[in-house]
Every structure is written in structure tokens, then in C-alpha cells.
Amino acid sequence: MLPIGVIGKDKSKSYVTYGLIVVNILVFIWELSVQSKGVFAFQAALGEVAFNVCRVGIDPLPNLFVDSFRTMFLHGSLLHLIGNMLYLWIFGRRVEAYFGSWKYLVFYIAAGSFATLGHVLFGGVVCRTATELKIVIGASGAIAGVMGGFLMLYPTARVKTLIGFFQPLFWQVKLPAVLFLGYWFIMDLLQGVGWLGVNTSTAHWAHIGGFVSGVVMVFLATMLYKPAPKPDPFEYLDD
């Protein structure tokens, strides 16, 4: 299932969401420039700026936080970048509209940090030495937090979704956010605990940690900051 949009018009300008997309693209262009110097140069550069699980317990916490922050803007491939930015564009704008730009930015960074923590605690990474390079990169964890926040704020919003891959073998459907995001989370959880038997390099526990943190933070925000927006019964008119 591939989301392509959410029904309804944006209620405000999404400066931070678009800014994050631009920064991620610029960082990826930098990555490409480093890759042009060779694989070893690229690996060395990532080792300097990305979050390395094997440094946990060795480097000071402020250093680890900075590494976690930087790793949110790194991507392993163009497809990795495009997928993440698509999800950020679709779900980030509505969450930003709820929080406001600067609070949303804090929320995004916090979700990414909790995502890294989830990967460290449950990702099953084994480091034989402190000099090993076991890095985790990508905005996926922070964006998973945005998705968890979206679920709490707009559970009945309709997500325009493509099912299938090739014409005419795909259909566009409009799924409630609770169904689309619930399915996404359950699939990641099953892969994270190994029940699907799929062995990939994806940091599923970073996704899970980010998603759960987004749910919790928005739940607290609706209790202490302001209530979740009321569903718009006429949003379908904006489709």
C-alpha cells in the first residue's frame, strides 16, 4: 500500500515540514558528492556523522544525541529518501498544523531521538568491539513519530492509497487513517519481533520506537496543550 495524499485542505502553511524535506534533499546531495570519492571515503564520512550503536556507553550522552540528530537527515539510497519524504509530506503537514511550526520541530526531533533509543534497546545489534561501525541512518524513525501523532489527531481522516504496483493492477482507495497507519504499525511490529521471517537491514525497532513516542507525546499534548481537532464532516468536498 502506498499513500499518495490525505483528503482535505491544509489549514496553515507547513514551513517546517517543507524545510525538513529541503534539508534532507540537500544532505543527500552531499552524500552523493562524498560517494563519488569512493566507498571507503563514504563509509568514513558516515562513521563521523551518523549514529553508531557501538559507541553507546562510551561516548558522552550529548555526543550521542548530536549523532542521533544528524543521522535523521542521512539516507542510504534515492529510493530511501523518496519514500521517507513522501510520508513526511503526507502526514507532517497536518501534525504541524496542530502543534505550530516550532513545537512541531521539537516534536519531530524528540520522536527521532526516541526512535534511536528504540533501536538501541531492542534492535538486537551486537558489537564485538567499540570500534565497529554499526550505524543507523534515515528519517524513518522521526517520520514514524509523525505518523503516530497523525493517528492520534486525525484517526478518521481519509488517506488516499494505491494498492498494487502496475496499471491496471492497482486501485486507489480512501482508507481511514486508523486503518492505514494501524496496518503499517502492525506490519513493522511483526517484522521487528521476527514473526514474519523477513530478514532486512531496516531498523524496525526505530520505526516502532518513533511511532509509539509520537502516539504518547500527542496524547499528552491533547491533555495538556490543546484538544485534538474535531473531524471535518465536509472534508470530502476538498478532494
Image (cartoon, rainbow, N blue to C red):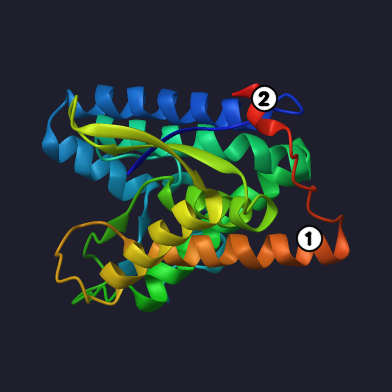
Q: State the residue at coordinates (65%, 23%).
A: 238
Q: Is residue 48 left or right of residue 152?
A: left
Q: State the mark number for residue 211.
A: none
Q: In this view, does 47 lie to the left or right of 157?
A: left
Q: State the mark number for residue 221.
A: 1
Position of 107 relative to 97 (above/below): below
Q: Is residue 8 left or right of residue 186?
A: right
Contact between labelled residues 1 and 2, with CB atoms less than 8 Å apart: no
Q: Is mark 2 on a helix, strand or loop?
A: helix
- Quadrant where the C terminus sits is top right
Position of 32 relative to 70 (above/below): above
The quadrant in which residue 9 appears is top right
Q: State the residue at coordinates (78%, 39%).
A: 100
Marks 2 and 1, the one that precedes in the sequence: 1
Q: Mark 2 to mark 1: distance in Å?
A: 29 Å
Where residue 176 appears, x then y in whole percent?
Answer: 53, 49
Kind of residue at badge 2 = Leu
Where residue 203 appears, x then y in whole percent?
Answer: 31, 60
The quadrant in which residue 99 appears is top right
Where residue 56 appears, x then y in whole percent?
Answer: 40, 71
Where residue 5 appears, x then y in whole percent?
Answer: 50, 31
Q: State the residue at coordinates (76%, 27%).
A: 12
Between 146 and 38, which is closer to the camera in this rendering? 146
The residue that label 2 is drawn on is 237
Between 192 and 115, which is closer to the camera in this rendering? 192
The quadrant in which residue 44 appears is top left
Would residue 124 be seen by someone viewing this image from the given angle? Answer: yes
Q: What element carries label 1?
A: helix
